[in-house]
Amino acid sequence: METRKAIHMVDITKTFGEVVANDKVCLDIRPGEILALLGENGSGKTTLMNMLSGIYLPEGGRICVNDNTEVIRCPRDAYNLGIGMIHQHFKLVDVLTAAENIVLGLNEHKLIDLKNVRTQVKAICDRYGFVVEPDKKVYDMSVSEKQTLEIVKVLYRGADILILDEPTAVLTPQETEKLFAVMRNMKADGKSIVIITHKLHEVMEISDRVAVLRRGKFIGDINTADTNPQQLTDMMVGRAVSLNIDRPEPKEPVERLMVQNLTVVDADGVKRLDNVSFTAYGGEILGIAGITGSGQRELLEAIAGLQTMEAGSSIRFMPPGKEEVELVGKSPLDIYKLGVGLAFVPEDRFGMGLVGSMDLSDNVMLRSYKCGKSAFTDRKTPRALAQKIVDELEVVTPSLNIPLRRLSGGNVQKVLVGREIASEPSLLMSAYAVRGLDINTSYTIYRLLNEQKARGAAVMYVGEDLDVLLELCDRILVLCAGKVSGIVDGRAAKKEEVGLLMTHLEEEAKA
Amino acid sequence: MKNKERTCNPEPFMRISKRGVVMPLWKSLGIRAIALAAALIVCAIVIFAIVKLNPIKVYGAMFEGAFGTNKRMWVTIRDMMMLLCIAIGLAPAFRMRFWNIGAEGQILAGGIVSAACMIYLSKSMATIPMMILMLALSVVAGGIWGFIPGWFKAKWNTNETLFTLMMNYIAIQITAYFVALWENPVGSNSVGVINSKTKIGWFPEIFGQDYALNVILVLALAVGMFIYLRYSKHGYEVAVVGESENTARYAAINVPKVIMRTMFLSGALCGIAGFLAVSGASHTISTSTAGGRGFTAIIVAWLAKFNSFVMIPIAALLVFLDKGAIEIASRYNLSNHVSNMLTGIILFFILGSEFFINYQVRFRGGKQKEVQA
């Protein structure tokens, strides 16, 4: 049993106003291990690590680094102690090169010798198997390259303890494998690595030990070899949760939406969608996979009438019991007036789907406030509907009159999905509907989508977790750089196959 | 590992955090009252230290300046209504996050058409139709002045801050032109009191008060704006557009239309303020008819968070401070700066109290400390 501790955190407490983010958390990090810090959203994982890396100061408790009690007041203190954190949202300067970003803020009182920096960076890369081009500008880099640069930056500063905050959230399966390989190399070199995540299969694959947080409290730690995903889930959620997603066979699928040659060019002249064609059927869930920014948002927005489309694009919508309509050239107002039952759960909850400063019932009426001839809004119907959503979807809220922004992400999402479903849609589009949600709420959302499928609605589900896509969807459309790189059967497809389609459009086109 | 020699207290001197729950009304009112009391104490010290006057007497003089006589009280009320009217006009624009700092120009636009009516129609119309016509024309004139930047914003996404500001200068120049045109008596470089004998186009007396109509008109607008913003579909659209244009488009709201409509409304209400200033107060027009009130009203609208009823006490306080400052300046022969300082101190404390309403401050060694022991 290893007894030495690289980091020893005792009784760490941190509050934000009334919210207790960390409540007397004790955590050890051992030298040369990969520790997975597991917990649902809002369980305090990132807060805890932010205190280790000097972003926040704990209100109670102490931190020992190599058996000395230390006060980490700022990220520089953390660097001096050999602690470096790679944040979920990268902290890089876009217009600078890789090498410039690495030395930025080192504040040495002498001229920076970039040539020397390049040599050192090269040495770090060779040692662990990174690829970094020191003179490449950050804005030219892919997400994966930026992440690599962040890691190299931390290593350059002499970190022995690396904290990675949800590093795989933005990576494809292949990139994740590369990252894990590098992490194993670093571990072999004696570095300690903390990986913050809520993806269980990653925990099982990469970590040596798992520590679980729940609602700001430390629940326990366990060697990865001695546990399994079910046990970890139960620790994380606090009770037994079923990890299976239903996938009933589609009943009598009917053509609902036929998209042909859809092309969208954004304001900068970049083709966001390129000749996209597919058909969505009522009674099935069509998954849409792809690296973030491959055109998923534009696709759904185009169907909802929020994008200008190039000539030749066609979106034919066949609502049940109504005449077929062409959606290209129609504004959201036109589509609303058609009354065809098009529901849309957008990716950006507060930037598009909801109004954060308004209360629940005001948000519920966002899509329907125009009803009726009166110059005044009807308050009663939305209020009743808001109450119904709160009751049926178990939205946790002190009242209906609270600004939505004050609710947690999961509850906000329930309100949004609940509102869209309440319109009894014939087409339900959802973008990243479970992003940032805890396991329990995610499963509620899957259940709601399945209910809509059973009702005969065509459901389009844009997702980022391939495992979920493969469990939930009947078919999966894969987007790569705005093009359809393939449509696969959700029951038969393999994860690697989808991952390959997400990144390798050109090979596919040649074949 | 570099060793740092740092022995300072790990606990920072104080922590500031946002309050988790909204304060009950009595508590927030209490904080504001404490702020006002503190402001008066600090002002007293300043008064005594700088000009060696008895602060109590100075405060008394301020009060007399604002409410000392019946006439003064009504002038204070009149000016307060004017300021309130502008703030009500700004409210929908600001609610939409449209930074309309062009109220000055919109006031002048309304004022010019009112003065024109008084000058050109003085022989041909009865009082009531004349009032209605002036009201309608000032609504149109102010509305157009607000609509122009709204239209450019809706069509080409121009910056409304610069645009509305520039529109002020245009309005001032146009006013200067009309002042020259209507100069009376010739050579005075001012329009003089219009229809000073016949009082045609002046607000009629109601209940024996010159300014009762001002009060009735503005309070009606206040109620109307409150209902409009809170209960109408238009008001709902304004709030959604203000929060996020993307959300508004998603909700099938015609964003350009809402921007143009709301800016017409905002300008129109400021135009009514111009009508009040000319027909209901000064009975003349000059380039200083708006007199910076288009900017002061921004403070009123924001402090009230666009609630027209909350605007009433705020407008009252600002006008009271202004009148009081003028009085003490003349009575004690002080320079303007001293009275402006007092106004500044009082505003500083009132605005500063918002911080304590929204945040809590905990000092080192406070009750939270036991955890560490």
Image (cartoon, coloured by chain):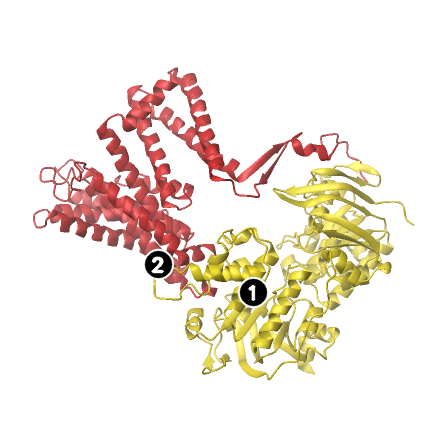
- Same-chain check, marks 1 and 2: no
Residue sitting at x 39%, y 40%: B299
Tell me if residue B334 comes above or below residue B133 in the rendering.
above
Residue under label 2: B260
**In which quadrant of the rendered image does the C terminus of chain B lie?**
top right
CA neighbours of label 1 inside 10 A, class few (<14), some (14 to 19), many (20+): many
Chain letter, disc 1 residue: A
* Pick the front one: A415 or B150: A415
Chain letter, disc 2 residue: B
Residue A348 visible from this viewpoint: no
Left or right of residue A17, residue B259 in this image: left
Q: Position of residue A149 (x, y in %)?
A: 72, 56
The amino acid at mark 2 is Met
Q: Position of residue A231 (x, y in %)?
A: 79, 60
Tell me if residue B370 comes above or below residue A266 in the rendering.
above
Q: Position of residue B320 (x, y in %)?
A: 33, 31
CA neighbours of label 2 inside 10 A, class few (<14), some (14 to 19), many (20+): many
Q: Which chain is yellow?
A: A
**Residue A107 occupies quadrant:** top right
Residue under label 1: A417
Q: Which mark is residue A271?
A: none
Residue at mark 1 to residue at mark 2: CA–CA distance: 32 Å
Instruction: Name the secondary structure under disc 1.
Output: helix
The amino acid at mark 1 is Val
Left or right of residue B298, residue A435 in this image: right
Residue sitting at x 30%, y 29%: B323
Q: Which chain is red?
A: B
Instruction: Name the secondary structure under disc 2.
Output: helix
Q: Nearer the viewer, mark 1 or mark 2?
A: 1
